[in-house]
Image (cartoon, helix red, strand yellow):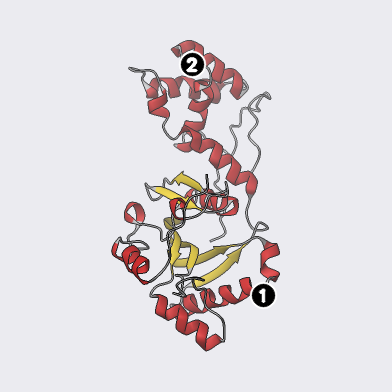
Amino acid sequence: MAKHRAAWGYRRYHRLVAEGRGQGTLSDYKPWITIHDIASKGVSSRTPGRTTGRIHHTLSRLETAFLYILDASPEVLDIREQYPLLPVTETVRIAEQAGIRHPRDNVSHYPYVMTTDFVITTETGLVARSIKQSSELDKPRVREKMEIERRYWEKRGVEWLIVTEREIDFQQARNIEWVYRSWYYDDMLPDGSDCSRIEDFFLDYYARTDMPVAEIARLTEEQFSLRSGLGLTTFQHMILENRIKLDLSRPIDLVSVRTGEGGVYSWMETYV
């Protein structure tokens, strides 16, 4: 069932500001838009973030893929998605100066708060990134709204760039998403299980032999009486915790005989 979108106007704008939307950092940040605020189209996601220690709200598959890559980058210190360009009077003024129609509600005619998909804190400062399908960039209205966004960040001396599907490493994003399935690994194990012993057992085989990952996973389940699938989850969790080092921009092979090298660890460079 589609979610009901609350009426937009002066009162809702000030209520969201009072709630602290768009404020805070790391685990205290509250995105301006959450997946509960929009009509569902089956592409929005709630994704846990290691960098921030909170749930992120992404509104498209491209945003979700980009989030995974950002979250795995050692250069990224904070990620704030659905970041509001406040105060709304500023983007209205920018639009007027540029001769661009500012987005407004069709009923109340109150101006919508414009947002940037990601504002990222890196070791060298802030950057802002808007995520768009490349096919959208030819649309005049899309280009107008992005011009407002560009000018907003230019006034603040913050680098703003558009990221399309052409710049996103989807293989890397899929691998990171797959690894993140082990997020609650400790809770998946039977009561009384020693997580360290299980991982050490797996890692011993992984480091000493050329045995396929799937076979090591089976032996781990057998040794510790784990339910089917938890051996592979152990592998995922050790990648997540950086105990096993892989180049996640390449497909992960679970069934072939390995070379014994274990791969070269790299989250790869991100588009930040």
Residue 138: quadrant of the picture = bottom right
Foreground residue among 265 and 130? 130
Counting from the top left corner in percent of width and height, residue 236 is at 51, 31
Above-or-below relation of 262 to 87? above
Residue situated in front as seen by the camera: 202 or 106:
106
Q: Which residue is mark 2?
A: 227
Find residue 146 and report its horizontal and vertical position in percent.
Answer: 57, 73
At horizontal 54% and vertical 41% (from top left) the residue drawn is 177
Q: Residues within 10 Å of mark 2 (few under 14, many from 20)?
A: few
- Check the image and report above or below for 97 versus 44: below
Residue type, label 2: Arg
Q: Nearer the viewer, residue 238 or 129?
A: 129
Horizontally, residue 195 falls left or right of residue 134, namely left
Can residue 124 be seen? no
Could you tell me which secondary element the residue under label 2 belongs to? loop
Residue 140 marker: 1
Q: Amino acid at mark 1?
A: Pro
The local crowd at label 1, few if under 14, some if 14 to 19, many if 20 or more residues have their Cα within 10 Å, is: few
Image spot of residue 215 (x, y percent): 60, 18
Report, in whole angstroms, how far the alpha carbon at label 2 lies from the one at label 1.
55 Å
Q: Residue at x 33, y 68 (%)?
A: 14
Q: Who comes first in sequence, dot 2 or dot 1?
A: 1
Q: Specify whether residue 3 is in view.
A: yes
